[in-house]
Amino acid sequence: MRSQVAASSRNQIATAIALENPSSSRAVDSRIALPEGVQPYRIDWVNTLTIATFHALALLALMPMFFNWTAVIVAIVAARLFGLIGINIGYHRLLTHRGFKCPKWLEHCFVVVAICCAEDTPARWVAVHRRHHEKADDQPDPHSPLAGFFWGHLGWLLVKNPDLSRLGIYGRYAKDILRDPFYVALERNSWQLKIMLIQINMFFFAGLAAELLHGGSWSDAVQFALSIVVWAVFVRIVFVWHQTWAVNSVTHMWGYRNYATDEDSRNNWLIGLLAHGEGWHNNHHADQRSARHGHRWWEFDTTYLTIRLFEKLGLASDIVTPRDLK
Ligand SMILES: [Zn+2]
Ligand SMILES: [Zn+2]
């Protein structure tokens, strides 16, 4: 049975969501062009060199001198914490979609954690993501994989896109963010670099102290501290990048659909688990403000559960839940 999708405009899903029609979407082989004005040879050198450098630094993890299981475990825990708290809760569900409320100091803490993930400033991240929601899988979606998987995953970051100029998108998509002087300061000063250096130092000296307290020599301590930096900063950042990028690419190509939204968003169980609930992306496109992306009982959403934990601690309120689920 085919239900009617009564949405009156793109990306607005009315109550008659076609739950029985999960595969309903545009033809899967449909392709779109790159956003207008994008020229593959107009490289964004800052982004390209940053991404290349961090991948190269992450590869140091393969050197035996930087490998130890403690560093691996610290990196896994850090990837989960930084990705979940900073990107999922801070940038995405709180700043972009206002899926819940929390004290301003806590919001700023979430954002500092997000900056540690090196995914640009809050105003920029929010503006690009809101642009994506408004034009998803259509022109000029900044990163639709219908223009090519590599483009949707990473390519869109490597070239200049006139549509995403800060002046152009901030006025339309990030005015609310830039009312906060803290976020304006993050735009103006080199805080991204400073926060990067601070986190590198924190992980280094924590590793150094841990090894010295454990009775290690200074040379052992320095080697252990460097291994912690390689794994818990560089490998972790690259891992969280690909986690975020996979939400843009994989979950607009592969997976199932609970809702007949008018783009190609999908629920992908692998990304759902890896990215702490962000992979239930079709649910998210259907109901963008909801802080809960897992709509069915088995769509495990650890980001949402963490927001509920903050609520239990008295630090979150007014949590927006899915409209069509009782
Ligand atoms: Zn999307
Ligand atoms: Zn979103």
Image (spheres, helix red, strand yellow):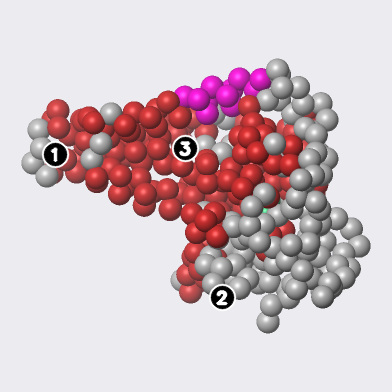
Asked if the beta carbon under badge 1 is closer than 8 A to the nearest atom of ligand 2, the reply is no
Q: Which residues are magenta?
A: 43-53
Nearer the observer: mark 3 or 2; the answer is 2
Q: Which residue is mark 1?
A: 212
Q: Tell me the distance, in whole angstroms, between the alpha carbons under discs 1 and 3.
A: 29 Å
Q: Where does residue 124 sit, x and y in percent of width and height?
A: 67, 39
Using the rendered image of the protein, determine whether residue 93 is visible from the camera's viewpoint: no
The amino acid type of the residue labelled 2 equals: Trp
Tell me if residue 301 comes above or below residue 323 in the rendering.
Answer: above
Q: Tell me the distance, in whole angstroms, between the alpha carbons under discs 3 and 2.
A: 31 Å
Q: Which residue is mark 2?
A: 297
The answer to whether marks 1 and 3 mark residues whose Cβ atoms lie closer than 8 Å is no
Mark 1 Cα shell of 10 Å, populated few (<14), some (14-19), many (≥20): some
Quarter of the rendered image showing ligand 2? bottom right
Using the rendered image of the protein, determine whether residue 312 is visible from the camera's viewpoint: yes
Q: Residue at x 24, y 46 (%)?
A: 70
Q: Residue at x 41, y 41 (%)?
A: 236
Q: Which residue is mark 3?
A: 238
Tell me if residue 288 comes above or below residue 33 in the rendering.
Answer: below
Mark before the other along the chain sequence, 1 or 3: 1
Magenta span: chief secondary structure: helix
Which secondary structure, mark 1?
A: helix
Mark 2 Cα shell of 10 Å, populated few (<14), some (14-19), many (≥20): few
